[in-house]
Image (tube, rainbow, N blue to C red):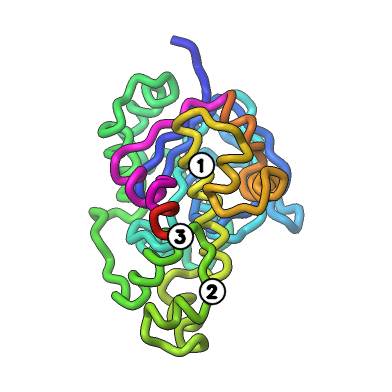
Amino acid sequence: MATQNFLHLWDDRFLYITPAIQSGLTARSSATLLASISGHPFALEAVDGTRVHCTAALVAPHVSRRLDVDGCGLLSLNLDPASSAYRMLAKRMGGHGILPIDGRRFGRLRDDFDPAQHGALCSRGLRALSVKLVEAINEFPESEAAIDPRIERVLQAIRAHAGQIPLRDLSAVACLSPDRLTHLFARQVGASVKRYALWTKVRRTVQQFTVRRPLTDVALVSGFTDAAHMSRTFQRYFGLSPSFLASQVRVTADDGASHAWGHQQGLASM
């Protein structure tokens, strides 16, 4: 079966599977778990030039890095900064921006890596693999970590408006002052309100590629001013252009992702 690029979307995470990638300097708001499919090392380079070769790694949100995967295949699991899975991994990272992981930690999970690369796992199987990868790092089952209900309401409002909602309106949603909301949000989510709003635009953009539509329409639905603004942001986050995603990647999403990030929700709320 031919190898190609896959992107699988769920409400709190997405999994990018590719045979090879060489990216420039990128940084994003999601925490990222990288794993070599073949077991051969890939290269990660930090912004200060420090270069590590590893078979798996955790990358914290907002950490700039270059990635060189030369034919070994890669699973790139991206966890929303507001997700319980990310909050579990944050403790494991212990403040490291890039944390190499021994790929042998995944054990028998590696049996599913090659089928995932060749599109032989269903969405349910891929979701289960993503959960088990996180559990293999944490060494205990993934569970729902509580988040302040006021911040949960703010997260829902940001997503519903594709990131385009003033801080004063979010403060009203949370029944907090803008300063208090800013501090509580950063502590709970690990990102500022502004950064999470931008992440929401990017995540909504990714969601639009489950069907074919003009890039200009994707940009407007996702909260960007135009396709050029969307493309610049996308390159900075992923090192890939939206046109590459539209033409070279098979994108699928489950119902949870469609409900949380689909454009119908955003349009209905604007």
Under circle 3, the secondary element is loop
The x, y position of residue 247, in whole percent, is: 59, 24
What residue sits 57% from the left and 65% below the top? 195
Q: Is residue 32 above or below residue 90?
A: above
Q: Residue 141: where, in percent of width, then height?
A: 23, 53
Circle 2 residues within 10 Å: few <14, some 14–19, many ≥20: few
Determine the CA span between mark 3 and mark 1. Answer: 20 Å
Residue toward you, 37 or 212: 212
Residue 112: x, y in percent?
A: 34, 27
- Residue 62: x and y in percent read 60, 60
- Residue that label 1 marks: 206
Which residue corresponds to mark 3? 270
Q: Which amino acid does label 2 sit on?
A: Pro
Which amino acid type is shown beneath numbered disc 1? Val
Residue in the foreground of this view, choosing between 202 and 183: 202
Q: Quadrant of residue 154?
A: bottom left
How packed is label 1: few (under 14 Cα within 10 Å), some, or many (20 or more)? Answer: many
Q: Are marks 3 and 1 in contact (CB under 8 Å)?
A: no
**Is residue 261 found inside the magenta-colored segment of the image?**
yes
Q: Is the magenta stretch mostly helix, strand or loop?
A: helix
Dot label at residue 166: 2
Structural distance between the alpha carbons of marks 2 and 1: 23 Å
**Tag 2 and tag 3, C-beta contact below 8 Å:** no
The reply to whether callout 2 and callout 1 are in contact (CB within 8 Å) is no
Q: Give the range drawn in magenta.
A: 248-265
Cα gap from disc 2 to disc 3, whole angstroms: 13 Å
- Of 9 and 130, nearer the camera is 9
Residue occupying image coordinates x 25% and y 61%:
144
Identity of the amino acid at label 3? Answer: Met
Residue that appears at 34% across and 19% down:
120
Helix, strand or loop under label 1: helix
* Residue 120 appears left or right of 103: left
